[in-house]
Amino acid sequence: MEGTREFSRRDFLKRSAAVGAGLAAAGALASCAAPQGSSGNAAPDGTAKTDVVWDKEADVVVVGFGGAGGAAAIEAASAGAQVTIVEITKEGGGSTTINGGFLMLGGTQLQKDLGINDTADEFAKYLVAAAGPSGNAEAWQFMAKGSPALYDWCVDVVGMTFDKVVDEGKVGAGRPGLGLAYSGNERSRKFSALAKPAPRGHIPSPEGSGVGFFRPLKAKVEELGCEVLYETTAEHLIQDSAGRVIGISATGADKKTLNIKAKRGVCLTAGGFGMNAEMMQANFIFDERPAYPTACPTELGIGIQMGLEIGADTYGMSQHAMGRALYSAAGDDPLKGIIVDPNGRRIVAEDEYYAFVGRAIIYNHGAFLIVDDQVNKDITTLGEPVASAATIEVLADALKMPPAILSATLGFYNQDVAAGEDSEFGKHDEFLVPLTTAPYHAYDVGASGCYYHTLGGLRIDLEARVQDLAGKPIPGLFAAGRNSNIAYGYYVGSGSSMFDVFTFGRIAGQNAAAESPVA
């Protein structure tokens, strides 16, 4: 989104931190879900009142016009359904427009055109392993299988374009003129042993950012004649006496209540809850929270609350993407140092992808980057060191960590460098340099410089149907994007969220349109 250098999640978040802080109070209020029936259009048991008056109706009602909502609307409209989208902002886009510009896919035509030998099966191996024990292997395998077709849909149906240029270096975010790069942790020692690495971050042109996803998506939605009600806030779902979701109540731009009938289905695609202070407080389980949410200001969990009001289940609410951007357009020099916890122990291969470094930092209650004077001369992206000292022991004292532990950590690392292999974490050779030139310097790379976004949401199945607490689909209700979750687990890499957004957004729209209409 910036013309002079790579778009950086961290840079964006620094610019928008003041906006996020101002929305904290609004988020806290929004997280207090009103009881069922508070709109006046649904009875306390969640069923529709007989006297509900519909102000509008459509075959499919989509709540939220970002990547998932746009995908749902395109598929529903393409199937012949009349679609109404309810969008809280003036122009839509959500967090799709502000993401770093990656769509993680495997086995695509773009990869083939660029001579990249990748398959959906190898992609699936990586996804399953990276999502960890709390991830849903079946969901990731399902998504990976559809990855090549999803790329074709993006290009052939929506009209996205991807430049035939690949960069296999350390690329932290998309940039104009680049079409493909690594956006996950495929090249780390752990994952490269499990699946063949390949660059899978597909970057849309010409913007090289999330705008390149939403701009053509929005144009296609308009081309298909979908109605979009901007500056309209969805509030509650409305069910019939059998429990089927048959519409929503919302507050329109004129501040009046608007009841919209959904003859076939409702798709909840209103994003996550990263800007909702109360929901974050309830669902973030670690001692230190990353400072910067990579979410648009309207990610207040509204769609999740709408589902909760009628008995929907949730999945992975304590799972979050947490990243730390150590490398950037300014260079990779910070990766030549070592990242240690507050006790002086090394915690991660410093050249791993943002989300994996960030997770290690948060799990270990903070971190410091330790470098010698030679490496420090080339570091331009981290501000000023928090401490410098003539010896590593004195540096440890300044950081209030045990000198013997930090000294031993550095000594062991330098032995590995001399041997030519990082035996502890597997950092790549190009970043292995001895840290022996005094003075030594420490940078705080803890939570205050990390970013996050939420991964949990309403539990859905592979058909994008929202599940109730008994594991049964709630009739007429679908969800996608960060409004829902079926796959995460750990965050697997940049662009995986857009992969999930488009995959289940499409499925939600297809299946909502295929429902039998209510009278």
Image: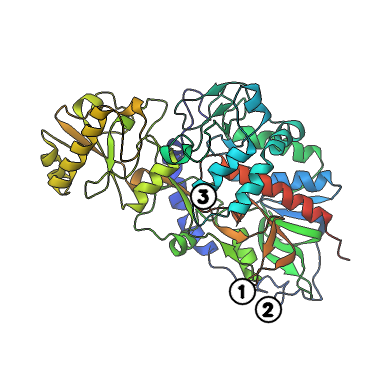
Q: In this image, 78 relative to 325: left or right?
A: right
- Considering the numbered disc 3 on the image, is that residue within a helix, a strand or a loop? helix
Packing grade of label 2 (10 A; few <14, some 14-19, many >=20) is some
Q: Kindly check if marks 3 and 1 are in contact, taking CB atoms under 8 A apart as contact.
A: no
Q: Quadrant of residue 399?
A: top left
Residue pointed to by mark 2: 44
Residue 54: % across, % down: 81, 64
Vertical placement of residue 134 versus 91, above or below: below
Which of 215/313 is in front? 313
Numbered circle sitting on residue 131: 3
Determine the CA span between mark 2 and mark 3.
Answer: 39 Å
The amino acid marked with disc number 3 is: Ala
Q: In this image, 404 relative to 3: left or right?
A: left
Residue 270 visible (yes or no) = yes
Q: Kindly check if marks 1 and 2 are in contact, taking CB atoms under 8 A apart as contact.
A: yes
For marks 3 and 1 on the same chain, the one whose residue lies earlier in the sequence = 1
Labels 2, 3: front one:
3
- Considering the numbered disc 2 on the image, is that residue within a helix, a strand or a loop? loop
For marks 1 and 2 on the same chain, the one whose residue lies earlier in the sequence = 1
Packing grade of label 3 (10 A; few <14, some 14-19, many >=20) is some
